[in-house]
């Protein structure tokens, strides 16, 4: 009997993990929540004063940004968030599978072989 209780508990935990991951991913895609900021990389740019030469007078800041930091960080953060949520869903499925194996009863049917005719 304790195997069945443990099995149903594992099924509940596994399905709960799957549903939680789905709800969290849905909240990120609907815009209610932002994914965790794992990356904080700087943008890609270059200094125009190096291209013009060192002898020319500079007109203030001559740095030019080609790719903004937001354009780099947002897709990286979203990708790793989805990978982590995929891991959570997979772990929940494995836990629920173990639970179903504990709940399921094992039936063995033995068939008798008729004696051979002489």
Image: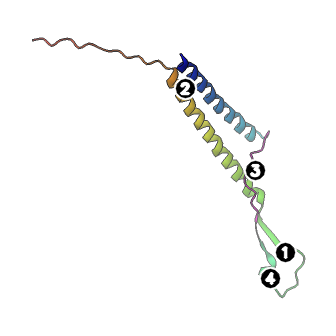
- Secondary structure category for the residue under label 2: helix
Residues at discs 4 and 1 in contact (Cβ within 8 Å): yes
User: Which residue is situated farthest in the front direction here?
Assistant: 2
Q: Position of residue 1 (x, y in %)?
A: 53, 15
**Rounded to the nearest whole Å, what is the CA distance between mark 4 and mark 3?**
37 Å
Instruction: Pick out the residue farthest to the bottom.
Output: 55
Residue pictured at 63% horizontal, 38% vertical: 88
| Residue ID for mark 1 | 62
Rounded to the nearest angstrom, the CA distance separating label 4 from label 1 is: 10 Å
The answer to which of marks 4 and 1 sits earlier in the sequence is 4
Q: Residue at x 47, y 18 (%)?
A: 105
In the rendered structure, the answer to whether residue 79 lies left or right of residue 91 reads: right
- Is the residue under label 2 in contact with that under label 4 (CB below 8 Å)? no
Q: Secondary structure at mark 3?
A: loop
Residue denoted by label 3 = 37
Q: What's the CA distance linking mark 2 and mark 3?
A: 35 Å
Residue 13, x across and y down, in percent = 63, 28
- The kind of secondary structure element at disc 4 is helix
Q: Which residue is mark 2?
A: 99
Quadrant assignment for the C terminus: top left
Q: CA distance from mark 4 to mark 2?
A: 69 Å
Q: Which is more toward the observer, 66 or 99? A: 99
| Disc 1 packing (10 Å; few <14; some 14–19; many ≥20) | some
Residue 41 spot, x, y in % from top left: 74, 60
Separation of marks 2 and 1 at Cα, in angstroms: 63 Å
First in sequence: mark 4 vs mark 2? 4
Residue 61 in the image, given as x and y percentages of width and height: 87, 74
């Amino acid at each position: 009997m304790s195997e069945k209780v443990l099995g149903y508990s594992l099924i509940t935990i596994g399905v709960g993990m799957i549903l939680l991951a789905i709800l969290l991913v849905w909240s990120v895609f609907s815009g209610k929540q932002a994914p965790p900021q794992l990356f904080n990389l700087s943008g890609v740019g270059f200094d125009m004063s190096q291209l013009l030469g060192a002898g020319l007078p500079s007109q203030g800041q001559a740095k030019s940004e080609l790719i903004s930091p937001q354009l780099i960080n947002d897709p990286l953060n979203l990708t790793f968030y989805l990978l982590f949520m995929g891991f959570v869903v997979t772990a929940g499925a494995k836990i629920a599978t173990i639970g179903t194996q504990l709940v399921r009863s094992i039936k063995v049917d033995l068939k008798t072989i008729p004696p051979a005719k002489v």
